[in-house]
Amino acid sequence: MAPERYLGREVFICHQLKKGDESALKFLYHLHSRRLFIFVSRFINNTIEAEDIVAESFIQLWKHRQEFESLDGVKAFLFVIAKNRSLNYLKKEKRKNSAHNEIQYLWRILHNHVEVTNSEQELVALIYREAENLPYLARKIFVLIYIDGMTIDEIASLLGMPAQNVRNNKSRALELLRNMLAKKTGHAF
């Protein structure tokens, strides 16, 4: 294709995208989605999440469609959005793993004081069952941190409270859980 024909096509696609022509978006999706998916899935090593991130990237492209003058700009935008979403996903997974490690800590303590015949799954289930008996705010924060994988700041924003209050309630939830488990098992933690 001659450079001037390519530039004309590029300008046309960008113009159609700005006008809100969904066929321009479909064209760009077919042009970039496969490479974007490969990039993201290698980055996060999770194909289902990678598909979601690719879809979210194109949603963001559509929201910002007025900003593009070239296909190179579109491609760069898609890859930056995908990279940032991938990093956010990895950070959230790291927080979930950290929260899971705290639960595992309670499990290890329990495991040392409860009959060895109990399985890990039963002990973790016991911890989550006991969490249901926590006071409302402590239980809500426990769930948001340990099940939903949210950060202290995200929870503070969601609940409209200072981050220190969230930290205090997290500590309270863990302390109450230790006490509940101590009563249930007859051992201090």
Image: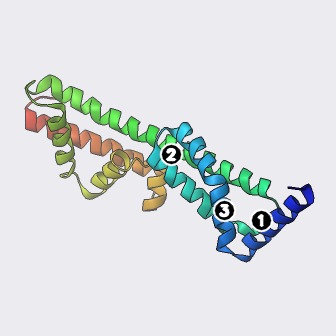
Residue that mark 2 sits on: 89
Q: Residues within 10 Å of mark 3 (few under 14, many from 20)?
A: many
Secondary structure under tag 1 reads helix
Q: Are marks 2 and 3 in contact (CB under 8 Å)?
A: no
* Residue 158 visible somewhere in the drawing: yes
Residue that mark 1 sits on: 67
Q: Which mark is residue 1?
A: none
Q: Residue at x 16, y 26 (%)?
A: 111
Looking at the picture, which amino acid does disc 2 mark? Answer: Tyr
Secondary structure under tag 3 reads helix
Residue that mark 3 sits on: 61
Looking at the picture, which amino acid does disc 1 mark? Answer: Glu
Q: Earlier in the sequence, mark 2 or mark 3?
A: 3
Where residue 95 appears, x then y in whole percent?
44, 40
Q: Earlier in the sequence, mark 3 or mark 1?
A: 3
Q: Residues within 10 Å of mark 2 (few under 14, many from 20)?
A: some
**184 sits left or right of 35 in the view:** left
Q: Residue at x 21, y 45 (%)?
A: 128
Q: Quadrant of the C terminus?
A: top left
